[in-house]
Image (tube, rainbow, N blue to C red):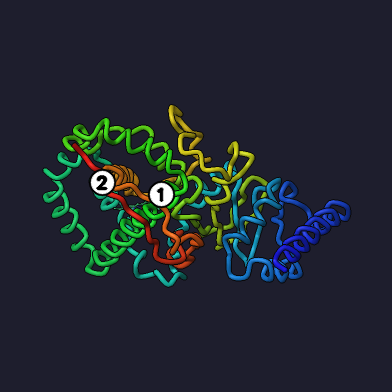
C-alpha cells in the first residue's frame, strides 16, 4: 500500500511539474515562486509516510532537487547549499520570532542574541580547546558571566541556563547512540577505530584534545548522515528577496540540513555511511556541511561537543567491544520536531564484551 502511494505521489508530482512548465501557471523558482505539492499529493504522502515527516520531506527533497527548495504546510524548506547560505545571511535576525511561537519559548528566549556581550563571553568559554586550561579559569569567567546576566534580569539568566542545559546535553547525548548503532553494523570499522585509540591511549589520558583522525572523520560522517539537529530555522522581520525568490514578511524558512547533507548533487554516494570519507580532507565547502548550523547563530558549543564526543567514543571503545542486540534490531531514528533533534525510536540496547588490557 505504502509503495503504491509513494508511486502515486511521484506520478502526481511529475504531472504537476509538466503542467506547470507547459502552462506556466506554476512557475518554478527561477521565475520567482516556490513549488508546493497540491492537496492530492499531500494526501498521498500522508498515506505513504503517515507521521514520518522526515521521510516525507526527504522524498520531496529528492523530487524538487532541481529547485533547491519547496513549500510545505506554510514552511519553506531550503536544501540547496547556495540558497541556504543566502537565506542564513539575509535572515540572521529572525530566529527569535520562530522561537516565539514554539513550545520552547521559555527555553530559548533571552538566549545569546538578546545579550551579545554575554554571547561573546560564553563563546570564549567554549571555544578554548584545552580542558585543563579551561578548568583553570572557568570558575572566574562563569562568575563574571553570571553577574552580567543577573544584572539583566533573573528571567534572562534562567532562560540562558535552560538553553545551555538543553542545547548542550540533548545534542551530544543523541549523537552517541547513533554513532554506536552504526559502529555495530560495521564491526571491522569499530576495530579499526579501537586500534587508533589503543595506539594513542597514553596521550589521550594526558591530553584530552589528542587528535584522532579516524574517529574524527567517522564523527563527521555520522553527523553528515544523521545531523542531530536535522534543520535550523529563521524568520524574516521584513519582506526579503532571496535571489529572485520573494519572501513575505515573517516567512518560516527551514534550512533543511538533512536534505543538504544527503543530496546526491553535493555528495558522492550520499546515503552511504563512509566513515573515512573526511579523512585527509582539509577543508569543506562550509555551507555543504552544517551540522552545527551557520552564520552568527552557529552552535556556540560545537568545539566542546567535538571534544566531548571524541573522548566518550575513545573511552567506550577502549573499554568495550559493542555488538548488535536482537532487542533493537528493528530500531529506527526519528525526529523530535519540538526539540528539533534526531533520536532512536526506542531505548537502545547493545551487547558488550570487555576489552582486556595487559
Ligand atoms: C553534537 C552536538 C551538537 C550539535 C549537533 C549542535 C547543533 C546545534 C545547531 C544546529 C544549532 C543551531 C544553529 C543555527 O541556528 O544556525 C545549535 C545552537 C546552539 N547550541 Fe549546539 N549543538 C551541539 C552541542 C552543543 C553543546 C555541547 C552546547 C553547549 C554546551 C551547545 C549550545 C548551543 C547553543 C547555546 C545554541 C544557540 C546559539 C544561538 O542561538 O545563538 N550545543 N546547536
Say which residue appears at 62% left-offset and 66% top-offset.
74
Residue 222: x and y in percent read: 45, 46
Above or below — where is 258 with respect to 209?
below
- In the drawing, does residue 93 fall left or right of residue 265? left
Q: How crowded is mark 1: few (under 14 residues within 10 Å), some or many (20 or more)?
A: some
Above or below — where is 239 with respect to 141?
below
Mark nearer the viewer, 2 or 1: 2
Residue for badge 2: 319
Say which residue appears at 16% left-offset and 53% top-offset.
142
Q: How crowded is mark 2: few (under 14 residues within 10 Å), some or many (20 or more)?
A: some
Q: In which quarter of the image is the C terminus?
A: top left
Between discs 2 and 1, the one toward the N terminus? 1
Q: Identify the disc placed on residue 279.
A: none
Say which residue appears at 23% left-offset and 35% top-offset.
201
* Helix, strand or loop at mark 2: helix
Depth order, front residue of 287/211: 211
Amino acid at each position: 500500500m505504502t509503495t503504491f502511494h509513494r508511486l502515486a505521489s511521484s506520478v502526481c508530482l511529475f504531472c504537476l511539474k509538466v503542467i506547470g512548465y507547459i502552462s506556466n501557471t506554476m512557475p518554478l523558482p527561477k521565475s520567482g515562486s516556490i513549488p508546493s505539492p497540491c492537496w492530492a499529493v499531500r494526501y498521498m504522502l500522508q498515506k505513504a509516510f503517515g507521521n514520518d515527516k522526515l521521510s516525507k520531506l526527504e522524498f520531496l527533497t529528492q523530487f524538487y532537487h532541481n529547485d533547491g527548495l519547496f513549500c510545505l504546510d506554510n514552511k519553506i524548506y531550503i536544501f540547496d547549499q547556495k540558497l541556504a547560505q543566502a537565506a542564513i545571511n539575509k535572515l540572521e535576525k529572525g530566529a527569535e520570532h520562530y522561537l516565539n511561537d514554539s513550545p520552547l519559548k521559555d527555553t530559548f528566549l533571552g538566549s545569546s542574541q538578546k545579550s551579545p556581550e554575554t554571547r561573546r563571553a560564553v563563546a570564549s568559554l567554549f571555544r578554548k580547546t584545552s580542558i585543563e586550561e579551561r578548568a583553570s579559569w572557568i570558575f572566574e569567567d562563569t562568575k563574571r558571566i553570571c553577574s552580567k546576566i543577573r544584572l539583566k534580569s533573573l528571567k534572562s539568566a534562567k532562560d540562558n541556563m535552560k538553553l545551555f542545559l538543553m542545547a548542550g546535553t540533548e545534542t551530544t547525548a543523541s549523537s552517541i547512540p547513533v554513532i554506536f548503532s552504526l559502529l555495530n553494523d560495521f564491526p571491522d570499522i569499530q576495530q579499526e577505530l579501537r586500534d587508533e585509540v589503543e595506539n594513542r591511549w597514553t596521550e589521550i589520558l594526558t591530553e584530552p584534545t589528542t587528535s584522532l583522525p579516524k574517529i574524527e572523520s567517522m564523527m563527521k560522517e555520522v553527523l553528515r548522515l544523521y545531523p542531530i539537529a536535522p534543520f535550523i530555522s529563521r524568520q524574516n522581520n521584513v519582506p526579503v528577496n532571496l535571489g529572485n525568490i520573494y519572501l513575505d514578511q515573517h516567512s518560516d524558512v527551514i534550512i533543511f540540513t538533512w536534505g543538504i547533507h544527503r543530496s546526491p548533487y553535493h555528495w558522492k554516494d550520499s546515503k552511504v555511511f563512509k566513515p573515512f570519507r573526511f579523512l585527509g580532507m582539509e577543508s569543506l565547502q562550509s555551507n555543504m556541511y552544517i551540522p552545527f548550523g551557520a552564520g552568527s547563530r552557529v552552535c556556540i558549543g560545537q568545539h566542546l561537543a567535538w571534544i566531548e564526543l571524541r573522548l566518550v567514543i575513545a573511552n567506550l571503545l577502549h573499554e568495550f567491544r559493542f555488538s548488535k542486540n536482537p532487542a533493537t534490531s528493528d530500531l529506527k531514528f526519528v525526529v523530535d520536531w519540538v526539540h528539533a533533534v534526531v533520536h532512536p525510536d526506542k531505548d537502545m540496547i547493545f551487547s558488550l564484551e570487555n576489552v582486556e588490557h595487559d
